[in-house]
Amino acid sequence: MSKDSMEDQEELRKMLHFFLEKMGATQVELSKGMDVSRPVVIEFLNQEKKRLPVNRQDLIKLCTTLQNNKPSKRKSKAEGEKTSQDIDSHPHANELRELLGEIGTDELLESAGFLPNNASIIKVSPKRFFQIAQVVALLEFLEVEDLVPTTQEFLAIANHKIAITNKGHFKYQENDYLTSLIDNLWESHPTLGLKLRLEVIDKLERTRDRLRAGGKTKFTQQEAIRLFISIAIKEQMLKNLPNLHLRVQKTEFQTLSRYVNAEKEYSDLYAQFVQIGHQAECALKTPGSCWTMQPQAKSLDSLTPVIMALVTCSFSYDGESHELIEWMYTSGNTIVENAIGALSLHMGLAEHIANVSISTKTLDSSIDSLVETTVILGNRPHYQGIWVDRDSMITMLQAIVYATKQWIGDQSTSGKLDLQIYTSACKALSDLRKRLTRARRAFQKFQFLDEECQTVEIKKIASTAREELKKIPQEDIYFSYRLNFYRCYFLTKRLELRQSNFQGNISNAQLLIQEMNQVLEEDQKVKQELVPIQALIRSEVYLYELSCGHEPNLFDKTKRSQWLRLEIWDREIRAAIKPGSCYKDPGWDVYLALSEMYGNVARIEFYLADEKSSLVAAAENFLRAAHYALRIGLAQRASRWLAFAGRAWIRVGETNLPKQASKFADKLAKTDLTAGHSNNFWQAVLSEIYLLDGEYLLLIQDDATNALEIFLKALKGAVYLSLNRRICDALFNISRCSEKISNLSVKEGLSRVFREEDSLTKSNANKLNPMHNLTSEKVLDLLCKLWSREDNPSWYQVGGEFSQLAASIWQKWHHDTEPGATTKHPIAELIEKKVWLGRV
């Protein structure tokens, strides 16, 4: 090969740096050895010059020079000393120079693109390297006479021979065969290049020290061999891989599903709840469920739980400082499948690459045995990985990471993948999903006053997702990342829409819906993948339409069911669960979409229906929604759906199930409440149950006085967290109670709920309305006005003011979304006619 025809000399540059850093060579020594001027050598080392004008004989001469010379010394001055002293540039510099004489020049020649001197060196194509490298590595441990010419049996025979022979390679050192192997690697056998040899030794030593620190003190012969082979293979295969560091640090698994035991106080309801749960899971084909085989099931304990996998990795690219990133994935599959799902999602694996074949074996019978995992990634071509470690889960994931890096390297080399874009997306997606998960959990636990639920934070997450999407090309290789950034965007926007809906900011909800509809049309392939998220958003749109009151199909009972499309959405959500999609199995998005769709459709029927069959069906759908919520651990959401079911049963005159629904809902709601939460927060969380209990007293037991106190608690709690629809429900119920109470003064009634620390004064406004919500402010204005009246009227005298305020809130939403409208909100009309939420 001529000097001018040489192409990439990056490996040669690395070898020269190796000579300088590890073998005590000097720039002068390199210059003289290769017959190249020192300035040219320096420019090449500093990457100022792409190629070095050397030929084959120049490099052979350099090796001879290094073998014959002593390593240089560098000067070091100890603290407080005036004179300097010589120290070794590297503790093994002399040994490495001696080994260079034994090993020869092949490693240096190959780094510069020349053929090696040793014609017997085996060259293997990349497709076959993984298997043949194992055979070659094992061959080096065997004497020639032990070799068997039968290649089909060779690996088994070689393993057996190594296990039973001890011919100098493994000198027994207190059960530490690994140290013996490391010491032996300083000799010329097995044949490894000088630079590669030092890298393998270094990694073996660091691995040994790390494992010892973790408590493993003994290493068997098999463990030592497999560690050597895995590291030697990886070091040789990693030569052309990107400078991307990914190391799995730990794995965590959280069971999200909550199981509730049967209690006597809600036994009838629980039996119905279990039946509906098994029906729902049978439709999803969940392991452990089959309604046709278990019609008399007593609990839901047989269902496979939904699990969240959290994988923490150390990440760096191109010399950047290491940082910890988190990968997460949720489904009803095993912990292994969830861990692999987290890796596949966050590493942006294309569909055909994400197929993984895994082989794992323990290397010893002891409890602290090392584990070896080999993996094959993808169909054609295959990408293979190997890893040896103590933790079987981390070993498996690290083997997959290693195989994935080969895929990344191939795509980068071919120009299909931009590493800068890829690594940026990988980090950004991890951070974004972590923030989104925190926000979603905070929402589900009514933590609306926390930073995670603030509008500013929600908007930041959505904005970041959009910015990241702008950076990602449209090519198919980036599709997984594009899809998941879109998921982050829509899930965050759905949170903002939900926030606008429950806070009564309906005009903002209108703008959000328009924005999401527009973005959804940007990428049709993404749209097809996001059916569960579309359903989730649609369920919030239903509440928006209920609030603004302009959709005629919603308020026409003959067209309502067809417009809501509940059965169609259920079918489409389940159809989205399929191999190759981002919803390979039911996880968080699927269960939440089903829960919200069934719950919100039932809520609309509860508010608008005036026939028994619709309300009975609504109650059943509330139970189904509660079941889906509990599958992903949303106890507060499930509690609310159960409370709504109880309210629906009250409207049809049921006397037993509403009380049981209250007990069941109360148990779930209080699972997340602690003594550290304020009394106002408790009342806010329990406000839906208060509405249920109050309506039972009012509509079933005709006890208006006690019902009034319960409704005032519901109102106070709803005001505290700006739960606008609950505010309207409580206001209307208070007006219904007031019609039957003429002997109780307003002050006496209010003082039972608004005690001294929560007195109805202007100075207490921030405490009672910490979210500064406009609707809450109107309620407090009314209550403060009534409290301060000198005539202290009875509830009968002021009840109309509560229903008027409830109707005006609905009417305001009606006008906010269509400013020129002269019509009245249908629910405002029902309130004024005093026929809303009545018995049927």
Image (cartoon, rainbow, N blue to C red):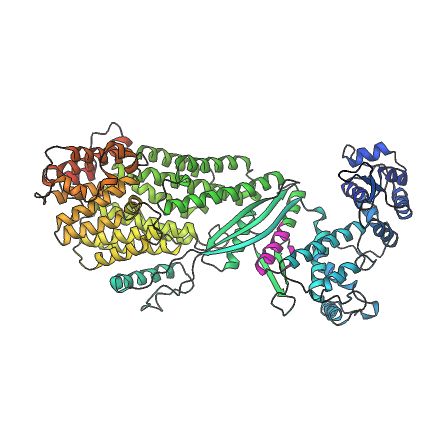
Quadrant of the rendered image containing residue 784 = top left
Residue 741, x across and y down, in percent: 10, 44
Near-viewer residue (196 or 737): 737
Residue 660, x across and y down, in percent: 24, 59
Is residue 386 something that shows in the picture? no
Q: Is residue 392 above or below residue 74?
A: below
Q: For the image shown, how many numbered marks are present on the structure?
A: 0
Q: Residue furthest top?
A: 820
Q: Residue furthest bottom?
A: 164
Q: Is residue 90 above or below residue 766?
A: below
Residue 680, x across and y down, in percent: 29, 43
Question: Going 12% across and 37% down the picture, which residue do you hit?
Answer: 798
Residue 149, x across and y down, in percent: 79, 69
User: Which quadrant would the N terminus be assigned to in this image?
Assistant: top right
Tell me if 502 is positioned left or right of 186 in this view. left
Tell me if 67 is positioned left or right of 287 in this view. right
Q: Is residue 7 above or below residue 370?
A: above
Q: Is residue 536 magenta?
A: no
Tell me if 701 is positioned left or right of 757 in this view. left
Question: Going 23% across and 34% down the picture, which residue do you hit?
Answer: 761
Q: Is residue 398 magenta?
A: yes
Question: Going 65% across and 58% down the picture, which residue do you hit?
Answer: 211
State the extent of the magenta-drawn residues as a range: 381-404
Near-viewer residue (230 or 565): 230
Near-viewer residue (267 or 706): 706
Is residue 165 something that shows in the picture? yes
